[in-house]
Amino acid sequence: MQTDIDPRNLIGRKAFDRNGAKIGTIDEVYLDDATGVPEWAAIRTGLFSRDAFVPLEPSELVEGTLQVPFDRALIKDAPDFGVGRHLSPEQELQLYHHYGLDVAPPSPPPDRDFGKLAGTESPEDNGPRPPRPHP
């Protein structure tokens, strides 16, 4: 998704699936809690006035419309959490799984050798020395 777009400018725009079928109109945009980047759009499908959540990351804004790279049936079957409320991490995870998107795990901490005792590394291999026998 183009991250330089003001999320307020997405509201009211039409959304289409990957085959060009109209999904509905963007009702709300949800931002990532940590980054503030637009992450999800709630699209009013017209079917029982229900909103379907779609991920903005693989979607594109093309000529004033949101092009969502998923089939309309999959979008309409997305979990319904209602609009106007915060999406919990668990709800976001359900949506990621629904769309078959990978969720990046938190990055591991830097690989450091905090457990080594000072002076146990040999200058030749920078690895730990074998234990010395006791006399």
Image: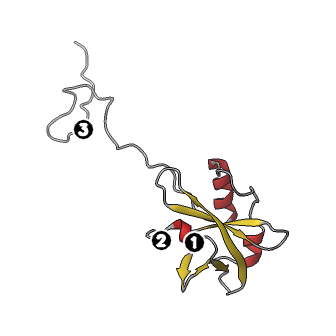
Q: Is residue 63 above or below residue 47?
A: below
> Residue 57, can we see it?
no
Reading the chain from its start, which is encountered first: label 1 or label 3? 1
Disc 2 residue type (three-letter): Ile
> Which of 127/11 is in front?
11
Mark 2–mark 3 Cα distance, whole angstroms, equals 51 Å
Left-right relation of 34 to 28: left
Q: Residue furthest right?
A: 48
Question: Could you tell me if the residues under marks 2 and 3 are in contact, i.e. CB atoms within 8 Å?
Answer: no
Q: Which residue is mark 2?
A: 5
Could one spot residue 6 in this view of the protein?
yes
Q: Answer left or right for 49 relative to 21.
A: right
Mark 1 vs mark 3: in front = 1
Q: Nearer the viewer, mark 2 or mark 3?
A: 2
CB contact under 8 Å: marks 1 and 2: yes
In front here: 88 or 71? 88
Label 1 packing within 10 angstroms: few (<14), some (14-19), many (20+) = many
Residue 10, label in figure = 1
Q: Nearer the viewer, residue 28 or 52?
A: 28
- Tell me if residue 32 comes above or below residue 9 in the rendering: above
Give me the residue at 18% from left, 26% from top: 119
- Count the labels in the image: 3
Q: Earlier in the sequence, mark 2 or mark 3?
A: 2
Image quarter where the C terminus lies is top left
Amino acid type, residue under disc 1 in the picture = Leu
Residue 32, percent from left and from top: 53, 55
Which residue is nearer to you in this view: 64 or 61? 64
Residue to which mark 3 is pinned: 127
Task: Tell me residue 78's x, y (percent).
Answer: 74, 65
Q: Secondary structure at mark 2?
A: loop
Residue at 62%, 77% in the rendered image? 13
